[in-house]
């Protein structure tokens, strides 16, 4: 542990993160350190950790082997770790909070810029920003629908579709499920899924049927979602999860494009889906900042 480690705490629709500014890439983000930091009893508490450094600095330090397409050396790169310390490809809520941090601390000169991630380049636009709040849109790339699969949660089997949003999802639209029914499901118990389809684990979304199902226009469909994230457990929101849920909801309606309002326990996010791309727009909050005490871990 270094003598001084600065941190910022933030969240996107209550999916919360500890941001670690580390431009010199000096921190050793071991699974032990990350999981302790994210622990809500012995650490700060968070769903994940976002290291703030440039892509070139992370590559030169050996954290990244190579940079993905569209990511430049001087682009800021979201080095994302799940709450259990494992490395993850992408986090849509995390990108919004990450972009908010960059804009609020004047580390970028424009309101539209690229954030690097292990899932690739993610263009972002910060529409409004203060030191504590922001409204951010993230270009999430395509949502690729795959094979049908199932998961068992709280003793019940749920059918869904695999969705690749840079990380793996099983999005289960449950016809007849009400928001009240959804709230009663235990996402903390035993969960099983098909490891042949998801060998690296999976994020699982349970989704109410879209309110506008059967309407002639796919715009402004609305769903409610809960999510169990791999390496974390249930979170109050999941950015890639809401994109996967929106794509699955449109598929349920027999469509591949449209705008979906996604209600999660932490708030509401707007997702726009077309055949080539998806965008995610929602709030970010920076709660505060501090310094880890030397010898804490």
Image (cartoon, grey):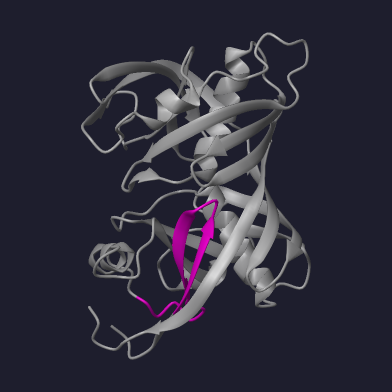
Q: Residue at left 30%, top 16%?
A: 157
Residue 23 covered by magenta stretch: yes
- Look at the image and tell me whether residue 69 can be seen: no
Q: Quadrant of residue 250?
A: top right
Secondary structure, magenta segment, majority class = strand
Where residue 198 appears, as percent x and y from the top left, is 34, 29
- Look at the image and tell me whether residue 113 can be seen: yes
Placement of 281 over or under 262, stated as above or below:
below
Q: Quadrant of the C terminus?
A: bottom left
Q: Residue at left 38%, top 60%?
A: 46
67 or 208, which is in the foreground?
Answer: 208
Where residue 189 appears, as percent x and y from the top left, is 22, 34
Q: Residue at left 51%, top 65%?
A: 10
234 or 86, which is in the foreground?
Answer: 234
Where residue 240 appears, as percent x and y from the top left, is 52, 41
Q: Is residue 49 left or right of residue 34?
A: right
113 or 98, which is in the foreground?
Answer: 98
Residue 26 covered by magenta stretch: yes
- Looking at the rendering, the stretch of residues picked out in magenta corresponds to 7-27
Q: Is residue 107 left or right of residue 183?
A: right
């Amino acid at each position: 542990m270094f003598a001084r480690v600065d941190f910022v705490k933030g969240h996107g629709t209550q999916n919360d993160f500890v941001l670690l500014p580390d431009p010199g890439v000096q921190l050793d983000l071991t699974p032990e350190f990350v999981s302790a930091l994210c622990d809500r009893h012995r650490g700060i508490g968070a769903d994940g950790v976002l290291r703030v450094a440039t892509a070139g600095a992370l590559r030169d330090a050996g954290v990244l082997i190579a940079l993905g397409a569209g990511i430049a050396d001087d682009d800021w790169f979201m080095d994302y770790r799940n709450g259990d310390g494992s490395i993850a490809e992408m986090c849509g809520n995390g990108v919004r909070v990450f972009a908010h941090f960059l804009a609020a601390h004047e580390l970028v000169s424009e309101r539209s810029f690229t954030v690097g991630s292990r899932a690739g380049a993610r263009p972002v636009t910060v529409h409004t920003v203060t030191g504590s709040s922001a409204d951010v849109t993230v270009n999430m790339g395509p949502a690729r629908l795959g094979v049908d699969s199932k998961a068992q949660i709280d003793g019940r089997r749920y059918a869904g579709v695999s969705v690749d949003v840079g990380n793996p999802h099983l999005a289960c639209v449950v016809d007849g499920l009400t928001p009240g029914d959804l709230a009663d499901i235990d996402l903390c118990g035993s969960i099983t899924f098909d490891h042949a389809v998801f060998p690296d684990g999976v994020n699982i979304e349970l989704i109410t049927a879209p309110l506008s199902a059967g309407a002639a226009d796919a715009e402004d469909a609305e769903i409610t979602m809960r999510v169990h994230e791999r390496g974390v457990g249930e979170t109050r929101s999941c950015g890639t999860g809401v994109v996967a849920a929106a794509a699955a909801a449109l598929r349920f309606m027999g469509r591949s494009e449209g705008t979906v309002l996604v209600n999660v326990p932490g708030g509401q996010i707007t997702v726009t889906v077309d055949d080539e791309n998806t965008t995610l727009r929602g709030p970010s909050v920076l709660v505060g900042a501090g310094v880890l005490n030397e010898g804490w871990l």
